[in-house]
Amino acid sequence: MPRRCRTVHLMDPVPAQDPESVAGCDVRGALARQRAQARAIRDLTKVIDCNIEIHRHPHAKREGR
């Protein structure tokens, strides 16, 4: 009997809005500038990479300390 394949639905890898940079955080600020430059030249792969790096940067976790 032949196997049937199911349809796979993939979600977008990034949120609908760009993550915000945090005032005083040089890393997030630099990434936000890189993202703006990438968006200006329509390099959407780089935009997504910057968004992921901003999202993963641990600065937000340290604010609560």
Image (cartoon, grey):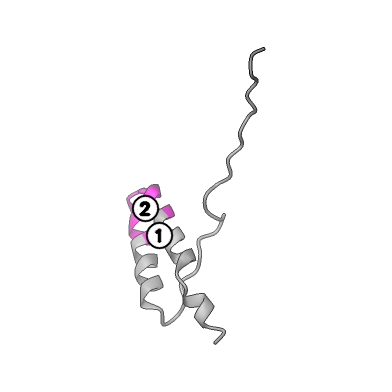
Find disc 2 in the rendering and name its residue. 46
Helix, strand or loop status at disc 1: helix
Can you give x and y, in whole percent of width and height, for residue 22 in the image?
Answer: 47, 76
In the foreground, 55 or 18: 55
Inspect the image, locate mark 2, and give the three-letter code of the amino acid beneath it: Lys
Residue found 58% across the figure and 40% down from its top? 10
Residue at 36% from the left image edge and 53% from the top image edge: 46
> What amino acid is labelled 1 in the image?
Cys
Outermost residue toward the bottom?
A: 65
Q: CA distance from mark 2 to mark 1?
A: 6 Å
Please give the name of the residue rendered at 58% of the width and 44% of the height, measured from the top-left corner.
Answer: 11
In the image, 63 versus 32, the foreground residue is 63
Query: Which quadrant is home to the C terminus?
Result: bottom right
**Residue 42 falls inside the magenta stretch:** yes
Q: Which span of residues is magenta-colored?
A: 35-48
Q: Which residue is mark 1?
A: 50
- Side (left or right) of 17 relative to 27: right
Q: Residues within 10 Å of mark 1 (few under 14, many from 20)?
A: many
- Dividing the picture into quarters, in which one does residue 30 lie? bottom left
The residue positioned farthest toward the top in the image shown: 1
The picture places residue 61, in percent across and down from the top left corner, at 53, 77
- Kindly identify the residue that appears in the image at 38 percent across and 60 percent down: 35
Image quadrant where residue 26 sits = bottom left
Q: Is residue 50 left or right of residue 17?
A: left
Where disc 2 sits, the SS reads helix
Relative image position of residue 8 (x, y in whole percent): 61, 33
Kindly check if marks 2 and 1 are in contact, taking CB atoms under 8 A apart as contact: yes
Q: Is residue 56 magenta?
A: no
